[in-house]
Amino acid sequence: MQVLGIDLGTSSVKVILADERGKVLATATRAYPCEHPRSGWSEQNPEDWYRESLMGVKECLASAKADPSSVRAMSFCGQMHGLVVLDEDDTVVRPAILWNDGRSTQECIYLNEHVGRERLLSWCANIAFPGFTAPKVLWLRRNEANNFARMAKLMLPKDYLAYKLTGAFCTDVSDASGTLLFDVRHRRWQPEMLERCGIDVSALPQVHESYEAVGTLRPDVASVLGLRPETLVVAGGGDNAVAAVGCGVVHEGQCLLSIGTSGTVITPSKRFRCEPHAALHSFADATGGYYLMGCILSAASAYTWWNDVLGNSVSKNLERVRLGDNPVMFLPYLMGERSPINDAEARGAFLGMSLDTHADQMTQAVMEGVAFALRDSFERTLSTEMDVSEVSLCGGGSRNALWVRIVASVLGREVFVLDGERGPGLGSCILGLVAAGAYESVSEACASLPQEGHRITPDESAIPRYEEAYESYRHLYPSLRDFFHERKMMLS
């Protein structure tokens, strides 16, 4: 048995073909453009996603010389929160508004201050952010009334692929959780939010669990791909929920830290939990449970920025580094910050520099600042009475050995660094395997598939130094908050 996983990202789609043991047989990546018609706006053409996904599937199958009869299912993961609008003729009304689009600031203010944060938390378990879908819908209604009036179907990016492949108008609980239109606790659309946004429930897709089949390939699509029309198409999930599946982090007591472009702290939970101060997102997961997630907007991207500032000359050795003994500190709020401060006006800052400061100290400070920001979300997770016994680490930053040692020492915990092709693409394959009957549940699949990696223990001598440094770090944002906001007013 073989399955396809389609990972619909912001800059490209990655297609993975895997067998029933989770072994990756072939991959293909296809890029597509992202348009920025105004500063802070981010849009894509959904037809680009579909075209390049089909091409990626064909390339992947050709590369593996796959037998079409052995491919039993395909599933998805994808960028969350995007707004895709179709009219009565299934024509895309306008370019999709993406997760990283910031145009709906005023709509978020309306939702958080006039509808109210406490009410939003009770309805949807989250507050409003410009990235979420509901504020985008309000923006559309206020600024493009004709397009809003044409809206017959509202869907999320990966669900557009499922609709084109099968004709099934569907989504899953994990992706729906990021719309701010969804009752996360009860796994259903939230009627009061639909009323506030002027959305009829008929314009919203049917909600499935992530591992459920939603249909089979349309015959014409199957012919184009060279697959059987009986090939199952599975609901899939949002990128973070499916990444947790791909990394085997599906049980309470586990925690997944990711150092990608952004950083995340994902903690599965058997029961619904909601951080009372909205410092963490509360979402349905891809296994039938829930998870808490902290999100920092600049993680590996902070390191990339600093490397660019230095002209691509960041030292790879950092021979003078002594963990926890760095006079320089760094706030990684280069794009504002999500968890736990929820402040779009926060900005990055180096502090503690002198005439003796050298570039290696500042590079170390960038990595430490990201580690401290991840710990902020980790501490908020623990404050919800979650008992975390196992921490896994993935993402591009996890391939930096020094950064991994810093993270382990800042947390004061051993971390399991995942190797190989782990993450959302493989996670979507696992969901396909469950839907196809290879495993009874996502948990069983994750327990059966090999988890390759290595363990890194913290530097015991650095732990007390990092405890002191973290306490200093925690005071930086409160001390600078007013400055950030005053500076924003001065420059606007």
Image (cartoon, grey):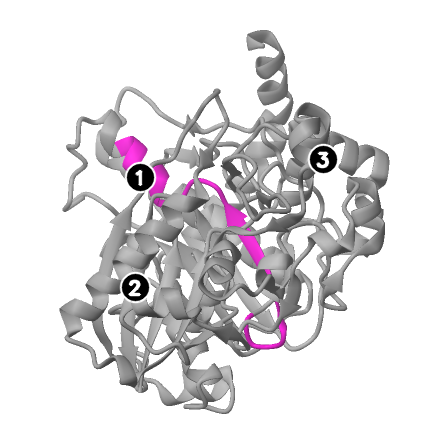
| Residue at the disc numbered 1 | 303
Q: What residue type is labelled 3?
A: Ala
User: Is disc 2 in contact with disc 1, using a CB cutoff of under 8 Å?
Assistant: no
Give me the residue at 30% from left, 86% from top.
21
* Left or right: 175 in relation to 189: left
Element type at mark 3? helix
Can the viewer see residue 192 in this picture? Answer: yes
Q: What residue type is labelled 1?
A: Tyr
- Provide the residue span drawn in magenta: 286-306
Which of the two labelled residues, at mark 3 and mark 1, occupies the earlier sequence position? 3
Which image quarter: residue 110? top right
| Residue at the disc numbered 3 | 149
Q: Which mark is residue 146?
A: none
Question: Mark 3, mark 1: which one is toward the viewer?
Answer: 3
Q: What residue type is labelled 2?
A: Val
User: Mark 2 and mark 3: span between their CA atoms?
Assistant: 34 Å
Question: Mark 2, mark 3: which one is toward the viewer?
Answer: 2
| Residue at the disc numbered 2 | 224
User: Is disc 3 in contact with disc 1, using a CB cutoff of under 8 Å?
Assistant: no
